Image (tube, grey):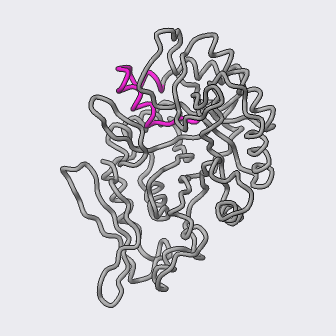
Amino acid sequence: MPASAFPNLGHGIGLRTSHYADFLGERTGGSEARDVRRDGKPRIDWLEVITDNFLGEGGNPRRVLRRVRADYPVVFHGVALSLGSTDPLDRRYLDAIAELAAEVEPAWISDHLCFSSLGGHHGHDLWPIPYHEESLRHVSQRIEQAQEHLRRPILVENVSSYVAFTASTYTEWDFLKELSARTGCGLLLDVNNVFVSAHNHGCDARTFLAGLPAEAIGQVHLAGHSRKGPLLLDTHDAEVPDGVWTLYREALKTYYPNEQPSFVSLEGFVDAMVLVEGLKRAGKELTREKLITALESIQNKDVGLGPKLTLKYSPMRHKGFDQIYTTVVRDGKPEILDDWKKLPH
């Protein structure tokens, strides 16, 4: 499946409940805070939503999604399709996704190469599968069924893993490559998951990248992880560390030697507007220094910020990240509006 099947939308972030007020233009506070956004909303190209959080009819989540979709392209990212399970595909779940997609018209739909259910019970986790011919045929059939049901190709994401199967005869990257070739699905490359799995299993992350077909990649995720003893855990609640940024740069060189990809999903940043502009200015060979320089180059007038709004940087050199606060001055005292935690080196 060529990447052109999944349109290049620009830079996006994952929509979380803490973002709702920003993207609805409902952020409370003084006029200075409202001036942070043009028309009260962030400058961002698109938003990724967790499909499962919006399947219920009515209620606040669906209200938010409808309003957000009126202003931004949206993509669906699911966590419960359980493509690797031996349980039958959940037709009611697929029906619900299809109905929501008919209303919202997402640019694409994605889920994970994993299983999360067994014997009718849902584990609410993303468990790895063995990589051999039998599982390849099994998962391929399930992807084809899901794509037929949804009437569109989907993106399949590589997951992080902490155990491996002795029965595997494929590497993960060869399995993904063959899966895309057999089903026509695209790939959602999670760079952090590659880094985490490579560390946990002692394989070469660059070899992983080199083994994936560039033409199948429709989206790229960036996120952080945490450490638990000898293992790295894909928690998405920490800074994007040096190694993941380095691997991301390797991915650029591998897949996009002549252009900068822009379908990157960043998690954990409450205020996306200035960050996204900074990423664009930082350019292809991204480093922490370039990103900070780019952020510092953004003047209030560039992004519609009020004259009293400033960006403050508090370097924490030995911690490996910077904290960035968006503040507004009220009655002569700075008040923190947003906290971008743990920017990477």
In the picture, measured across the screen, residue 2 lies left or right of residue 236, that is: right
Judged by its main secondary structure, the magenta piece is helix
Q: Residue at x 44, y 30 (%)?
A: 194
Name the quarter where the N terminus is drawn.
top right
Q: Is residue 37 above or below residue 254?
A: below
Where in the figure is residue 222, as x and y percent of width and height?
A: 46, 43
- Please give the count of numbered marks on the rendered protein: 0
Range of the magenta residues? 188-209
Q: Quadrant of residue 322?
A: bottom left
Q: Is residue 214 above or below residue 54?
A: above
Where in the figure is residue 217, as x and y percent of width and height?
A: 60, 34
Q: Residue at x 55, y 47 (%)?
A: 262
Q: Quadrant of residue 70?
A: bottom right
Where in the figure is residue 130, as x and y percent of width and height?
A: 54, 16
Q: Is residue 344 above or below residue 133?
A: below
In the picture, measured across the screen, residue 224 lies left or right of residue 174, that is: left
Identity of the residue furthest to the left in this view: 318
Q: Residue at x 73, y 34 (%)?
A: 90
Q: Residue at x 46, y 10 (%)?
A: 166
In the picture, measured across the screen, residue 315 lies left or right of residue 293, that is: left
Whether 207 is among the magenta residues is yes
